[in-house]
Structure formats: structure tokens, C-alpha cells
Amino acid sequence: MSILVLVDGWEPAPWVRALQAAMPDERIEAYPDVEDPEAVEYALVWAAQGETLDVFPNLKALFSLGAGVDHLFGGNTLPPVPLARVVDPDLTAWMTEWVVAQVLLHHRQQLQYSQQQRHRNWQVLPQPLAREVQVGLMGLGELGRDAAGLLHKLGFGLRGWSRSPKELDNVTCFYGADGLDEFLSATDILVCLLPLTPETNGLIGRSVFEKLNQSGPLGGPVFINAGRGRIHVETDVVAALQNGVLKAASLDVFEVEPLPQESPLWDLDNVIITPHVAAVSDPRTLSKLIARQVRAHRESRSLEYLVDMTRGY
Ligand code: NDP
Ligand code: OXD
């Protein structure tokens, strides 16, 4: 019996090492070096397609090594086994750090001050209070809720939007297509922490940006995306940053990654770009979660963090 690490674009060796340390009695293999495909019971995957998984006829469960699972839905039919994703306090903390860092950079007008610094220009800008700024979180799941907690402590006003109705302390909640416009209308800083699904693909474009609060305390709305790049329409992001419908943006995810050299985003001075690093999957912590999940499955207990295959997240 074996556990397979099947990662595309990541180095498998650190995963194999960390997993072997967390599960010393298990046989861990990295694709494509599989001794016996029929012995593979669990596959830990990042960006693997159904076609590749077809060769393991005795799979019992799939584990996404990322919090998002869209990387698994792009290709062929997946094997009919449960799919669990990653929910981990360290990963969540990293995302909250990234989101809060970006919100604060825009709130404290760091892009303008950095530009002034380059021109040796000593000029004080009017500074709103955090409570005068409304942060709108699209996605109130594991990551959105945690970010909301710290943003509230910092004093920001909070609005949130999800698929199903929610009641959260300190967050004015909206849901579904019917709640979107009202959610957007008072949002000054829009933060996307949605999963990529057929419903969210291309959701955030020109009409969303135009509905944000255009007369807020920051002098224009800000867009922050750490969900997935294909949730935004990149040509609309660029146009909105150029024509002032958006004052600024922070982007960790892009329609195409790595962001192509010819993307106009690289040349805009009102955008902050990070290379999909807001909350990376770290073998040091995630191997413990996977070990717990494998043990639970072997002992016929339920897996945690199962993906709803019909919703796609
Ligand atoms: P969750 O599944 O816990 O939460 C997803 C949230 O999005 C839920 O609140 C859900 O609503 C909402 N949602 C989903 N579909 C819709 C829709 N059609 N309309 C409105 N709301 C919707 O996910 P996580 O918080 O754990 O992660 C979110 C995403 O963050 C991941 O899928 C991944 O793409 C991204 N991510 C990015 C990383 C990075 O480094 N950039 C790292 C980790 C994750 P409801 O509550 O009603 O179900
Ligand atoms: C994830 C990611 O989904 O790293 O975990 O993007």
C-alpha cells in the first residue's frame, strides 16, 4: 500500500520528506516513480489532472495540497473518491497577514508616499481613520472570516459577501447575486478570497469596479485579489487602474501564472504584484494534517474539509 505525491510545478522531495517523517510506517512515493500503481491508496495532488489519476485503480481518497481545488477540475473526470482540501491554521495566518498588510498599505497611502520619496517630495496627505473605511470581503470562508477578525481589531468597517446567508459579529453580511450590488455600493477596499468555480469565473470586472464606492475616504476604491486570477477580468482591472475607476490594486493571483512579461500590469505604478505567495502550502505543517486525515480514513472516521463536488469548492 502506498501514498502518492503528485505535484505539478512544485518540488516533490520536501513533501516526501515531511510526509515520511509524519507517517514513518507508510510508503510515500512521488509521481512518476511509482512501483505499483495498484497499491496507491491516497494521492496528494497539486495541479494533477484526472487523466493522470486514471492509472491508480485503487485510490480511496484524494487530498488537494492547496486550499483551492480548481486545479483539479480543469481536466478530465476525477476518480469517484472523496476529495479533501487543506485548511490549516498556519496557512490561514499567512493569508490574513497578506490581506491585512495590503489593506494597511493602501489605507496608509504607501504607494503615494513611496512615489513622493522617489521625488524627494515631503508632502503630508490627509489620512482617514480605519473606522471610516469599509473593507468588503468577497468570500467568508476559512480565510475570509479570519482576515475579518484582525481587520475588525484594527478598526475597519467590514462588509462580507458569500453564496449562502451568514451572520457574523462585526461584519455586515450580504449573499448571492441579489446581495452583490448593495455589498459593493459602500465598499472602499474590495478583497477577493473566493474560490474559482464556474460561478465565480470572470465575476469581478468593469461592472463590479464601477459599483464600488467611488466617493470614499481613500479617494477611490482599491481591489485586492488573493483568491484566483480567473475570478477577475484582467483587461478590466488594467483599464480600471488606468482610468481611475480603481485607485489602486494588490494582486497575488493572475489569469495566467507566472504573470507574462508583456502584461501591462507590470508597468502600472498603482498596483502591487506578488507571485502567488499570499499563503503557500508548506510541507512542514500540512504533512501533519495529511497524516491525521490518512489515519482517520484508515480508522473509518470521517475526513475533514471535504469538497462538495457539485459546488466545486
Ligand atoms: P472556503 O471554501 O472556506 O470559503 C469560500 C467562500 O467563498 C465561502 O464563504 C463561500 O460561500 C464563498 N463563495 C463560493 N462561491 C461563491 C459564489 N458563487 N458567490 C458568493 N460567494 C461564494 O475557502 P477558503 O476561505 O479556505 O479559500 C478561498 C480561496 O482562497 C481558495 O479557494 C483559493 O482559491 C484561495 N487561496 C489562495 C491562496 C494564495 O496563496 N493566493 C492560498 C490559499 C487559498 P458560502 O460560505 O456560502 O459557502
Ligand atoms: C491554495 C493556493 O489554494 O496556494 O492553497 O493558492
Image: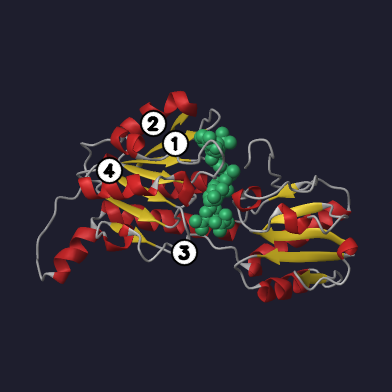
Q: Which residue is mark 3?
A: 258
Q: Earlier in the sequence, mark 1 or mark 4?
A: 1
Q: Earlier in the sequence, mark 2 or mark 3?
A: 2
Q: Earlier in the sequence, mark 1 or mark 2?
A: 1
The three-letter amino acid code for the residue at tag 1 is Gly
- Looking at mark 1, is its residue's CB closer than 8 Å to ligand 1? no
Q: Which residue is mark 1?
A: 160
**Where 163 sits versus 114, above or below?**
above
For this view, does 199 lie left or right of residue 307? Answer: left
Q: Residue 221 got which mark?
A: 4
Question: Cα distance, mark 2 to mark 4?
Answer: 13 Å
Disc 1 vs disc 2: Cβ atoms closer than 8 Å?
A: yes
Residue 197: x and y, percent? 56, 41
Disc 2 vs disc 3: Cβ atoms closer than 8 Å?
A: no
Looking at the image, the residue that sits furthest to the top is 178
Q: Residues within 10 Å of mark 2 (few under 14, many from 20)?
A: many
Question: Cα distance, mark 1 to mark 3?
Answer: 29 Å
Disc 1 vs disc 4: Cβ atoms closer than 8 Å?
A: no
Residue 260: x and y, percent? 41, 63
The three-letter amino acid code for the residue at tag 4 is Pro
Name the residue located 76 percent from the left edge and 74 percent from the top edge: 21
Element marked by disc 3: loop
